[in-house]
Image (cartoon, helix red, strand yellow):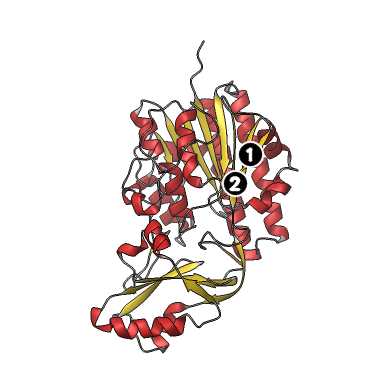
Amino acid sequence: MKLTPRLLMVSFDAVGDQDIDFLLTLPNFSALCSRGTLVREVSSIFISNTYPTHTTIQTGVLPYMHGVFDNDFQSPSIRIEKWRFHVNNIRVKTLPEEVTRAGKTVCSILFPVTGGAKIKYNLPEIPGHVPVWQRIWDTFSYGSPGFVASSLLRKGYLLRYFKTSQIDDFAAAVAGSIIKRKQPDLVMVHFLDADVAKHRYGPHSAHSRASLVRLDHRLGKMMEAIEKAGLKESMSVLVFSDHNCSDVHTSIRPNFIRRSFGISDRDAYFHCSQGVCFLRVTDPKKKDEVAGFVKIFLENPGVDRLLTAVEMHESGADTEFAYGFSAASGYSFGRKQLGQHGYSLDRDQYHTFYAVSGRHIPQGEVRTGGSLLNICPLAVDLLDLEPWSMEGKNEIFER
């Protein structure tokens, strides 16, 4: 009897290649890798922030094509956080969309840029600093109301204090439950635990190490659910991260510097993406004055260099920004945190990873290289979908 191919996709947000040696000492991640293939030293995409990267993971193309330039929108007129969480921000085909079009069932749990997606079981991530009641309302509004209600009734007790680790525990429990009860063809889950720990305490802190242990435990719970559902032979497991995270000792506020130089918000404005920032010139009459400011800004010890034309293009920044800047080592642009991402991809020790087990996957192999662009084509082949045009390719097996 031919088995129906299924896939569990698990995002370990902000887990870098340097975390892999420790993860391999943990029971569930090491078991996954022994049954499949681990790919290390994988390049993220630029801008290496959560929403652009996860959109690339869903589409197999870079931001200049898929349209999700950064996590959020920024301008002097925006006084509250405005995130790009809605699927309408994506300009190309997505994996969950194509799985649904093929008559298969999709479940997405807190996966970025799935707000409003037309999939059967959708519990979208509602980002930003918003009240709990607003987050719940938006989750129902932009997700699948029946599935959201069922998930909260079944597993909502895990959200006692609404901390990130509890939200991740809730996501893992919901994923395990839906796998056992409904057996979807594609399950997508996003875990933020390591990302939050690295921001608050630094990438090499004990808190960050503890978050990896919790991630391994959640992975084990979902793998156990697959086995209990009788899907061990048919459901592949693909674990990946979206970007690495670097230590920060100093944060720069570019718009404060710009104002001190006498350039108003009406004339130009910085969009800060942590590891990089972009300068929009809104008054063409101020072009020469802004160019003079740029020379001075580049003398700041926290500013490493101008972004290249290729970086501006691939990120999609060249359509609205005149300049882009890369932060120097130990620096970031925007709000101060001890760990940050969003950096250009030429930084040392800034790679990520993915690991996959299932049918067609070589067992016990460790490879290096490649890009997050290759995850979507791999998922398409694991699900036996009709492929479409992408910039990445499946480098694990030939279909």
Work out whether 295 lies above or below 114. Answer: below
Return the x and y of residue 38 as percentages of the image width and height.
63, 39
Residue sticking out furthest to the right: 25
Work out whether 199 lies above or below 394. Answer: below
Work out whether 224 lies above or below 329. Answer: above
Residue sticking out furthest to the top: 1
- Classify 10 Å Cα crowding around label 2: few (below 14), some (14-19), many (20 and above): many
Residue 353: numbered disc: 2
Q: Quadrant of residue 322?
A: bottom left
Element assignment for label 1: strand
50 or 187, nearer to the observer: 50
- The answer to whether residue 78 is left or right of residue 125 is left
- The answer to whether residue 307 is left or right of residue 32 is left
Q: Quadrant of residue 392?
A: top left
Identify which amino acid the numbered label 2 is placed on. Answer: Phe
Residue 38: numbered disc: 1
> Residue at (52%, 10%) from the top-left corner?
1
Counting the numbered discs, the total is: 2
Residue sticking out furthest to the front: 309
Query: Distance between the Cα atoms at labels 2 and 1?
Result: 8 Å
130 or 369, nearer to the observer: 369
> Residue at (30%, 84%) from the top-left corner?
288
Return the x and y of residue 365 as percentages of the image width and height.
66, 34
Q: Are discs 2 and 1 less than 8 Å apart at CB?
A: yes
> Residue at (36%, 36%) from the top-left corner?
97
